[in-house]
Image: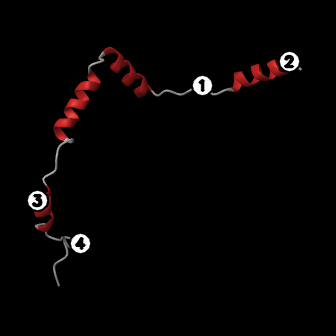
């Protein structure tokens, strides 16, 4: 019985799908290995542009000052 199970497991191992890794994933992984400081720089840059407090008054003012656009901009108003 044990030999039958080992044959079966070897048979299954032959048909197991290898884990796929795209060329870009390989490139990104190797780039991060070569430049370990890269991720810290990415986080720093993100904090400059995205992670900051929102000014709610200016957001509300911008929302109120928006002019509604008609559905088809090239049609003359009737």
Mark pair 4, 3: CA separation: 31 Å
Mark pair 3, 2: CA separation: 74 Å
Please identify the quarter of the rendering in which residue 6 is found: top right
Q: Classify residue 17 as left or right of residue 64.
A: right
User: Which residue is more in the foreground, 58 or 19?
Assistant: 58
Give how far across and how far down residue 32 sits, in percent.
34, 20
* Label 3–label 1 contact, CB within 8 A: no
Which residue is the site of mark 4? 72
**In the figure, 50 relative to 21: above or below?**
below
Give how far across and how far down residue 47 sits, in percent.
20, 36
Which residue is the site of mark 2? 2
- Give neighbour class at mark 2: few <14, some 14-19, many 20+ (Cα, 10 Å): few
Q: Classify residue 59 as left or right of residue 40.
A: left
- Give neighbour class at mark 4: few <14, some 14-19, many 20+ (Cα, 10 Å): few
Residue extending furthest toward the top: 34
Report the mark closest to the observer, 3 or 2.
3
User: Which residue is more in the foreground, 69 or 54?
Assistant: 54
- Circle nearer the N terminus (2, 1): 2
- Picture colour scheme: secondary structure
Report the mark closest to the observer, 3 or 1.
3
Residue extending furthest toward the right: 1
- Circle nearer the N terminus (4, 3): 3
Per the image, label 2 sits on a secondary structure element best described as: helix
Which residue is the site of mark 1? 18
Mark pair 1, 4: CA separation: 52 Å
């Amino acid at each position: 019985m044990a030999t039958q199970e080992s044959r079966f497991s070897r048979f299954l191992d032959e048909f197991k799908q290898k884990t796929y890794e795209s060329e870009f994933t390989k490139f990104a992984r190797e780039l991060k290995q070569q430049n370990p400081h890269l991720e810290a720089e990415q986080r720093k840059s993100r904090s400059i542009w995205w992670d900051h407090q929102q000014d709610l008054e200016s957001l509300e003012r911008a929302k109120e000052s928006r002019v509604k656009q008609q559905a088809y901009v090239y049609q003359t108003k009737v």
